[in-house]
């Protein structure tokens, strides 16, 4: 079986969680990976007949090859066309009720994003080193402006391009997280770190946020922040980004002072965790795979 996931060359925390989490929960299950590289080509080239394990991310779409079995475990829909109902898709569970509805699945298939299972690897309490941390969307991290804004306000900056273990460790050591990255919120919630969502641009897909939030009985209500792209050369570009930095700083300062962090109820998180583990245990038994419900780092 191949582990299928989206690969962003610069690095993206949510996508990279796949290679961090699944080999620990299903040791020896994967003969390799198959990467979807949307920034390079929308086409996905198979390199063999092995079934695909489709996990963390918005990976349910029509671009996945038809001639191979797809085992969907907690992934979501949101981009592109719905996949064909050709018998090659096996939906063990999906990210949330919006995905289940779009695919015509029964409500019990909607559990939660499996990234919440990172809590199994990080059960031990940690010292809270950061009062407030901020994670941008990976594309917004490219300009470097958010890091400057955080430095100005004394906010701990977490880069979504860092390796997953570092990002998770920094989230865990935070008292309150402000995040534009969906999986920043998901992992924070799993580690019982209160979080606040922000959104800076139209490519932030509300559907996937709402899909996950509904799965854990929360409401998605992001605060708007400026969009940072790489600045144009010359003085005008610097002036525009400088003004955006001031606006962003004012917004984050307000959230630090008067924002209302979110966190799912303990009972809800425990329920979703147990349902995911039960479903994964059943999947492993059906396919003769080893399953480690309490993995070590």
Image (cartoon, grey):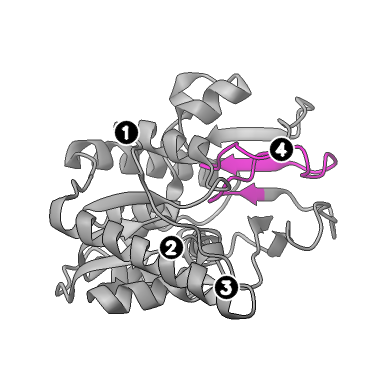
- Frontmost residue, 61 versus 245: 245
Q: From mark 2 to mark 1, how far is it between C-alphas? A: 20 Å
Q: Secondary structure at mark 4?
A: loop
In the picture of the structure, the residue carrying the numbered disc 1 is: 219
Q: From mark 4 to mark 1, how far is it between C-alphas? A: 24 Å
As for residue 74 lying within the magenta part, the answer is yes
In the picture of the structure, the residue carrying the numbered disc 3 is: 236
Using the rendered view, name the quadrant where residue 61 is placed. Answer: top right
Q: From mark 2 to mark 4, how far is it between C-alphas? A: 24 Å
Q: Residues within 10 Å of mark 2 (few under 14, many from 20)?
A: many
Nearer the camera: disc 3 or disc 1:
3
Q: Secondary structure at mark 1?
A: loop
Q: From mark 2 to mark 3, how far is it between C-alphas? A: 24 Å
Q: Residues within 10 Å of mark 4 (few under 14, many from 20)?
A: few
Residue at image coords 76%, 28%? 87
Q: Which residues are magenta?
A: 53-79
Give x and y (percent) for residue 283.
Answer: 53, 42
> Considering only order in the chain, which callout, 3 or 4, is on the residue closer to the N terminus?
4
Q: Residues within 10 Å of mark 3 (few under 14, many from 20)?
A: few
Q: Main secondary structure of the magenta part?
A: loop
Nearer the camera: disc 2 or disc 4:
2
Give x and y (percent) for residue 153.
Answer: 24, 73
Residue 136 shows which numbered tag? Answer: 2
Nearer the camera: disc 2 or disc 3:
3
Residue 80 shows which numbered tag? Answer: 4
Q: Residues within 10 Å of mark 1 (few under 14, many from 20)?
A: some
Give x and y (percent) for residue 54.
Answer: 62, 48
Q: Secondary structure at mark 3?
A: helix
Give x and y (percent) for residue 297.
Answer: 37, 73
In the rendered structure, the answer to whether residue 142 lies left or right of residue 199 reads: right
Residue at image coords 56%, 39%? 76
């Amino acid at each position: 079986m191949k582990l299928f996931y989206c690969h962003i060359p610069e690095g993206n925390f949510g996508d990279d969680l796949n290679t961090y989490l699944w080999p620990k929960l299903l040791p020896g299950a994967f003969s390799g990976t198959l990467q979807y590289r949307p920034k390079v080509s929308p086409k996905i080239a198979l390199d063999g007949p092995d079934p695909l394990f489709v996990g963390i991310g918005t990976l349910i779409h029509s671009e996945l090859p038809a001639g191979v079995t797809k085992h969907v475990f907690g992934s979501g829909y949101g981009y592109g066309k719905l996949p064909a109902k050709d018998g090659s898709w096996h939906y063990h569970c999906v990210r949330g009720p919006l995905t289940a509805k779009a695919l015509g699945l029964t409500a019990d298939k909607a559990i939660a994003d499996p990234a919440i299972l990172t809590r199994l690897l990080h059960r031990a309490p940690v010292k809270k080193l950061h009062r407030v941390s901020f994670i941008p969307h990976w594309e917004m991290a490219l300009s470097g402006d958010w890091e400057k804004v955080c430095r100005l306000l004394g906010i701990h900056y977490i880069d979504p391009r860092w390796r997953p273990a570092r990002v998770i460790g920094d989230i865990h050591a935070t008292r309150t997280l402000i995040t534009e990255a969906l999986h920043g919120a998901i992992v924070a919630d799993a580690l019982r770190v209160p979080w606040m969502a922000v959104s800076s641009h139209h490519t932030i897909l509300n559907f996937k946020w709402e899909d996950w939030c509904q799965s854990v009985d929360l409401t998605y209500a992001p605060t708007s922040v400026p969009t940072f792209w790489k600045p144009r050369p010359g003085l005008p570009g610097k002036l525009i980004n400088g003004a955006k930095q001031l606006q962003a700083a004012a917004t984050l300062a307000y959230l630090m002072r008067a924002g209302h962090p979110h966190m799912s109820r303990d009972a809800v998180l425990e329920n979703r965790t147990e349902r995911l583990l039960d479903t994964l245990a059943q999947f492993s038994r059906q396919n003769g795979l080893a399953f480690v419900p309490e993995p070590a780092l």
